[in-house]
């Protein structure tokens, strides 16, 4: 190992106090403090303050101190510190005059300088990252014969760029979503009402109608009693089961939906103009879905008949005649009743909420919040806390495919170093934004890919992202700062 730079010796005129954490060497007569091993790029710097006010060295003796980096079979001694007694110093000076002195050594005549800083820069090698910094001590007589040898640990704390970077907490970027000018929402409910044969009257006590109507009424009552909600319209769409003539079923489904509309208007004292009705006629699509979920042995044949027979009358005839009519009878009893259904959709507007209101409403009715309100709720909490992350998760549940919702929840996960969840959410974020690129850098950083992380921060900063600029400053401070 070659020394990259000559040592720097700065003699201190005054030493006010020995810093806390100082270490004693050579029979407690030498004090070393502010010990630092600092790697930067291809260099490593060893620096320490040395006080020798209590040191005693005989006139014919010399104390040789060799700071050395050691890791297994790897070893790198730094230039030695030689403290000569009075006669030993004169002998050394004569040797130097003859060209026999140690050019790399720091030679100090005993009693002349007692306080100084030892600083040495050398080439850095990877094994030094976990090396020990030890002090070899040798006391020699006038003929350089060892009188005492020992080795003591100075420190094993080597500050490398990687270690300093690993201690960083990069800044995560978030995007504040715009507020919705008008928050329009809808709630849908499938009502499976049963009607008597060829009858369109709503009968609350008929079969399971009471439970169905109660559920629908509960939905309407909840929305209409909410001070944060303004109901705009109630849309009712009806279907009929596909037995009987097609035209008759279409009219029957229409009359049944008009009947449900009148029933709900009366129950809730609502104007008829608030309702819209439509009818889908025979619910063949629903029949295919229910058949595919059933255990009927003939279901594949029935589905083929439905999908390949265009004429309505022919399709119904083939279904009735299949296997002597047994499958058709089973469907009439167990499947067709579920095709006589109505879809009731309530369209409503939600008033804008204050942050305090949004905190309360989010727990009970998260669907009433827009993305900006989720964002504001999140930042009422400290970053990285469960409530902070929970607000962004709640937003994602309402907007699962929205790029901003995914970006922000990824950022929330990154505040807790949850790499897997963050990576999954970032996959649905807008990859062209500076916030995405910064957060990709944070993700890469936590995965240990520092090169990619730095490149992302650079790119995001060039796009004007302030968080990326902060990350670059943190990065450079960790690399370049001194103790």
Image (tube, rainbow, N blue to C red):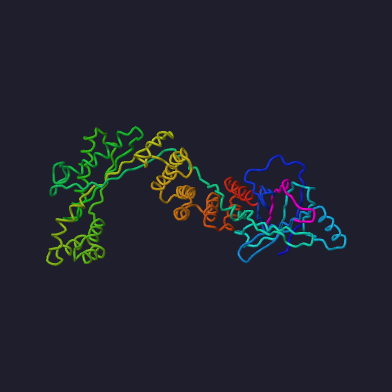
Q: Residue furthest right?
A: 97
Quadrant hosting residue 345: top left
Q: Position of residue 437 (x, y in %)?
A: 55, 53
Q: Reply above or below: 186 against 336.
A: above
Q: Position of residue 142 (x, y in %)?
A: 79, 59
Q: Is residue 135 left or right of residue 423?
A: right
Residue occupying image coordinates x 17% and y 48%: 194
Q: How many marks?
A: 0
Q: Is residue 388 left or right of residue 287?
A: right
**Towards the viewer: 105 or 292:** 105
**Towards the viewer: 218 or 191:** 218
Range of magenta residues: 44-62
Q: Position of residue 277 (x, y in %)?
A: 27, 43
Instruction: Name the quadrant of the N terminus.
Output: bottom right
Residue occupying image coordinates x 15% and y 47%: 195
Q: Is residue 338 left or right of residue 419?
A: left
**Towards the viewer: 265 or 353:** 353
Q: Position of residue 206 (x, y in %)?
A: 13, 44
Quadrant hosting residue 105: bottom right
Q: Reply above or below: 172 against 300.
A: above
Q: Is residue 143 magenta?
A: no
């Amino acid at each position: 190992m070659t020394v990259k730079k000559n040592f720097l010796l700065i003699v201190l005129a005054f030493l006010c106090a020995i810093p806390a954490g100082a270490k004693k060497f050579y029979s407690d007569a030498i004090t070393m403090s502010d010990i630092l091993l600092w790697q930067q790029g291809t260099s490593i710097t060893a620096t320490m303050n040395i006080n020798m006010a209590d040191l005693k060295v005989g006139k014919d003796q010399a104390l040789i101190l060799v700071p050395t980096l050691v890791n297994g079979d790897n070893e790198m001694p730094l230039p030695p510190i030689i403290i000569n007694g009075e006669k030993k110093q004169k002998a050394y000076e004569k040797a130097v005059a003859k060209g026999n002195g140690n050019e790399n050594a720091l030679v100090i005549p005993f009693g002349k300088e007692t306080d100084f800083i030892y600083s040495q820069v050398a080439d850095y090698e990877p094994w030094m990252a976990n090396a020990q910094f030890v002090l070899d001590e040798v006391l020699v007589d006038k003929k350089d014969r060892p009188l005492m040898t020992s080795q003591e640990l100075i420190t094993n704390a080597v500050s490398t760029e990687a270690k300093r970077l690993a201690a960083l907490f990069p800044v995560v970027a978030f995007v504040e979503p715009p507020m919705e000018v008008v928050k329009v929402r809808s709630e849908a409910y499938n009502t499976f009402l049963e009607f008597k044969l060829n009858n369109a009257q709503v009968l609350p006590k008929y079969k399971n109608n009471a439970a169905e109507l109660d559920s629908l009424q509960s939905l309407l009552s909840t929305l209409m009693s909410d001070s944060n909600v303004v109901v705009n319209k109630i849309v009712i769409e009806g279907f009929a089961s596909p037995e009987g003539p097609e035209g008759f079923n279409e009219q029957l489904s229409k009359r049944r939906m008009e009947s449900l509309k009148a029933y709900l208007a009366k129950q809730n004292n609502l104007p008829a103009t608030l309702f819209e009705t439509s009818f889908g006629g025979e619910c063949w699509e629903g029949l295919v879905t229910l058949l595919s979920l059933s255990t009927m042995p003939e279901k594949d044949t029935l589905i083929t008949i439905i999908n390949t027979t265009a004429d309505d009358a022919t399709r119904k005839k083939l279904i009735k005649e299949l296997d002597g009519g047994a499958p058709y009878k089973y469907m009439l009893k167990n499947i067709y009743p579920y095709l006589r259904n109505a879809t009731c959709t309530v369209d409503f507007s939600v008033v804008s909420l204050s942050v305090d209101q949004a905190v309360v409403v989010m727990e009970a009715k998260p669907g009433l919040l827009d993305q900006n309100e989720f964002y504001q709720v999140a930042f009422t909490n400290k970053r990285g806390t469960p409530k902070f992350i929970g607000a962004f998760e709640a937003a994602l549940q309402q907007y699962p495919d929205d790029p901003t919702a995914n970006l922000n929840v990824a950022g929330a996960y990154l505040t807790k170093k949850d790499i897997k969840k963050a990576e999954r959410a970032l996959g649905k974020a807008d990859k062209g934004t500076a916030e995405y690129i910064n957060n990709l850098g944070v993700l890469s950083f936590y995965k240990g890919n520092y090169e990619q992380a730095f490149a992302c921060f650079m790119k995001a900063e060039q796009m004007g992202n302030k968080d990326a600029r902060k990350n670059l400053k943190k990065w450079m401070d960790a690399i370049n700062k001194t103790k």
